């Protein structure tokens, strides 16, 4: 069973970073990449993000499903961009190089460059998100959020969400296996329609059981007077080490490079041709 979002314990260099460092890295690099349309910078970020996957010792089978889902969504998005805005790249780069066809749906080099930039944005944010989710303990994540100024009430809510997603996923597969034991085929041997029908039959009971679980947790937290104090301590609170400061320094350097490129290019957009 693939654990799409659950924390996976490990002893890699990425695992040893504090939750605060990983949270800041994820947020800052994601924001910098989303704002930039410089292909050079985005490719560099994509290579760096892919390298962190290797450093974190994350196995392909653990992320294969998520990567395939994102790839399908990315391709659909690129097709829709071309259908609804086939000349947006021309508008963006103020240049037109027709490669195929004519008229409003003429395929231009500028449109291809723009859509490649959009694709790169997907495939640098995905490794960053996967590294962050799979190497950060939910309690470390909550402590990190609180350390950068987020209310501990909100931090705990995010932590509980991350903590129970793997539980819900495990419960889904447990019910699916029980259904198959009763003779209802839901494996790859079954047709796609039958698998969708079986999954739909599991989702609704799963939603109601999740709502019951949320109600139980809320009542338990109320009984313990959660939220009464203005501050709280954290069992998983971590002190920044030399390793964390080096990573944060690298992040500052990457942001400065982005700002320098904006100044050199005269804006966020860079057209290589």
Image (spheres, rainbow, N blue to C red):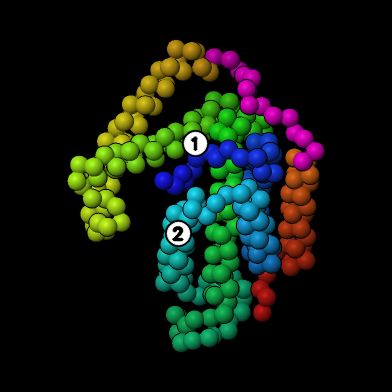
Q: Residue at x 55, y 33 (%)?
A: 138
Towards the viewer: 87 or 56: 56
Towards the viewer: 134 or 108: 134
Towards the viewer: 47 or 122: 47
Which mark identifies residue 68? 2
* 121 displayed left or right of 259: left
Q: Quadrant of the C terminus?
A: bottom right
* 188 displayed left or right of 52: left
Q: Is residue 165 above or below residue 238?
A: below
Q: Position of residue 131 (x, y in %)?
A: 59, 47
Q: Is residue 217 above or below residue 32?
A: above
Q: Is disc 2 surrounded by few (<14), some (14 to 19) or many (20+) residues within 10 Å?
A: few
Residue 91 in sight here: no
Sequence-earlier tag: 2 or 1: 2
Q: Residue at x 74, y 54 (%)?
A: 254
Residue numbers of the magenta segment: 228-243
As drawn, the residue found furthest toward the front would be 181
Q: CA distance from mark 2 to mark 1?
A: 21 Å
Which mark identifies residue 162? 1
Q: Secondary structure at mark 1?
A: helix
Q: Position of residue 239 (x, y in %)?
A: 73, 30
Q: Position of residue 28 (x, y in %)?
A: 66, 47
Q: Is residue 29 above or below residue 118?
A: above
Q: Residue at x 46, y 87 (%)?
A: 101
Towards the viewer: 107 or 51: 51
Q: Secondary structure at mark 2?
A: helix
172 inside magenta stretch: no
Q: Position of residue 48 (x, y in %)?
A: 67, 57
Q: Residue at x 19, y 46 (%)?
A: 183
Residue 53 in sight here: yes
Dominant secondary structure of the magenta stretch? Answer: loop
């Amino acid at each position: 069973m693939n654990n799409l979002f659950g924390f996976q314990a490990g002893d890699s260099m990425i695992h040893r970073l504090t939750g605060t460092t990983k949270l800041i890295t994820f947020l800052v690099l994601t924001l910098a990449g989303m704002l930039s349309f410089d292909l050079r910078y985005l490719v560099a970020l994509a290579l760096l993000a892919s390298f962190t996957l290797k450093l974190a010792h994350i196995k392909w089978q653990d992320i294969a499903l998520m990567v395939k889902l994102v790839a399908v969504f990315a391709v659909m998005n690129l097709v829709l961009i071309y259908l609804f805005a086939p000349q947006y790249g021309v508008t963006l780069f103020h240049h037109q190089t027709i490669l195929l066809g004519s008229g409003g749906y003429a395929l231009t080099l500028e449109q291809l460059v723009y859509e490649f930039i959009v694709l790169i944005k997907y495939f640098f944010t995905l490794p960053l998100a996967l590294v962050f989710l799979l190497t950060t303990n939910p309690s470390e994540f909550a402590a990190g959020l609180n350390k950068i100024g987020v209310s501990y009430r909100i931090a705990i809510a995010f932590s509980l969400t991350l903590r129970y997603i793997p539980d819900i996923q495990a419960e889904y597969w447990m019910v699916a296996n029980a259904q198959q034991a009763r003779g209802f085929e839901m494996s790859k041997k079954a047709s796609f329609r039958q698998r969708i029908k079986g999954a739909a039959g599991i989702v609704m009971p799963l939603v109601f059981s999740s709502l019951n679980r949320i109600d139980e947790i809320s009542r338990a937290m109320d009984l313990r007077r959660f939220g009464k104090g203005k501050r709280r301590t954290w069992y998983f609170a971590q002190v920044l080490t030399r390793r964390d400061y080096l990573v944060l320094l690298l992040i500052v350097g990457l942001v400065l490079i982005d700002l320098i490129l904006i100044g050199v290019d005269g804006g966020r957009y860079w057209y290589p041709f």
